[in-house]
Image (spheres, rainbow, N blue to C red):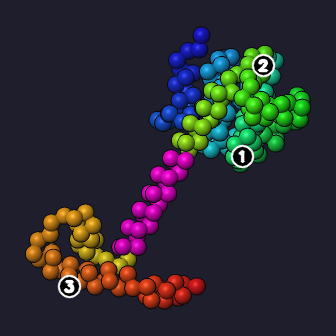
């Protein structure tokens, strides 16, 4: 029986549906997931490890040092190789994981022999053998796809925020705060007072027309080269 705290720590570490609100001991959490021998957690391990590698400078040996039993150390090594096979299958790279994996690879028993069969099992949707149990390829892939979708969504949010800040900075270089306010009203179709309409037509619209001029745009680009 896995205690709820372990699931909570996994959540905080950042598996797709989770948002961390406080610090978590990444190495203890990874070790506890291994020691749990809980198939649900093991089937989330590649996603969990990918998230951890994006948040921390991984030292996989530190996680393994918290595993005293040989059976747990073996399971940890096999889960790492499974994660590597999963990343290869989806052709995704995690630089922090790759660096940590290369450093720790020498301790993996039968690494070269076990990676290809795991890739084949994932490709053929077969049950994946890890530490004397067989994990569901369907759930492994589903959990990892959820992680990738979550990562892509977060990246899109970051890109949108960056574009928003970039646009705001550019507007501030051309328009005054009052002029930006009128621009937003115009874009949102909000009603302007007579004074605002006159000011918009007299000052703001002229700048907008100048910015829309293709020759001015090309001239600006040429000056930046």
Q: How many marks?
A: 3
Q: Secondary structure at mark 1?
A: loop
Q: Quadrant of residue 42?
A: top right
Distance Cα–Cα, label 1 vs label 3: 55 Å
Of residues 177 and 215, the one drawn nearer to the viewer in this rendering: 215
Question: What residue is shown with label 3?
Answer: 202
Disc 3, SS: helix
In the image, is residue 58 above or below residue 79?
A: below
Helix, strand, or loop for circle 2? loop
Taking the view exactly as shown, the residue that stands out farthest to the front is 124
Whether residue 167 sits left or right of residue 135 in the image: it is left
Q: Which residues are magenta?
A: 152-172
Pointer 1 with pointer 2, Cβ within 8 A: no
When asked about the image quadrant of residue 166, the answer is bottom left
How far is the residue under mark 1 from the one under mark 2?
25 Å
Residue 149: x percent and y percent? 55, 42
Q: Quadrant of the C terminus?
A: bottom right
Query: What is the chief secondary structure element of the magenta stretch?
Result: helix
* Residue matched to label 1: 91
Quarter of image, res 124 = top right
Left or right: 147 in relation to 112? left
Residue 78, position in %: x, y?
78, 27
Residue at x 20% of width, y 85% of height: 202
Categorize mark 1 by other alpha carbons within 10 Å: few (<14), some (14-19), many (20+): few
Front of the two marks 1 and 2: 1
- Image point 80% across, 33% down: which residue? 120
Q: At 74% from the left edge and 16% from the top edge, which residue is drawn?
A: 133
* Distance from the alpha carbon under mark 3 to that under mark 2: 75 Å
Question: In the rendered image, which residue does mark 2 sit on?
Answer: 131
Q: Earlier in the sequence, mark 1 or mark 3?
A: 1
Q: Nearer the viewer, residue 103 or 110?
A: 110
């Amino acid at each position: 029986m896995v205690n709820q705290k372990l699931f909570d720590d996994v959540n905080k570490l950042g598996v797709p549906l989770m948002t961390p609100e406080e610090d978590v001991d990444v190495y203890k959490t990874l070790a506890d997931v291994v020691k749990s021998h809980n198939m649900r957690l093991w089937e989330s391990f590649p996603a969990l490890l990918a998230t951890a590698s994006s948040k921390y400078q991984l030292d996989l040996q530190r996680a393994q040092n918290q595993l005293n039993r040989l059976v747990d150390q073996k399971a940890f090594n096999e889960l790492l190789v499974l994660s590597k096979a999963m990343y290869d299958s989806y052709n995704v790279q995690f630089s922090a994981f790759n660096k940590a994996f290369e450093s720790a690879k020498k301790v993996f028993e039968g690494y070269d022999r076990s990676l290809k069969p795991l890739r084949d099992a994932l490709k053929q949707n077969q049950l994946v053998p890890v530490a004397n149990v067989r994990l569901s390829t369907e759930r492994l892939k589903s959990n990892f796809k959820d992680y990738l979708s979550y990562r892509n969504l977060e990246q899109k949010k970051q890109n949108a925020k960056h574009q928003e800040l970039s646009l705001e900075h550019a507007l501030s270089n051309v328009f005054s705060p009052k002029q930006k306010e009128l621009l937003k009203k115009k874009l949102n179709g909000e009603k302007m007072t007579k004074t605002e309409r006159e000011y918009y037509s007299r000052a703001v619209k002229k700048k907008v027309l100048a910015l829309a001029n293709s020759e001015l745009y090309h001239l600006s680009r040429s000056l930046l080269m």
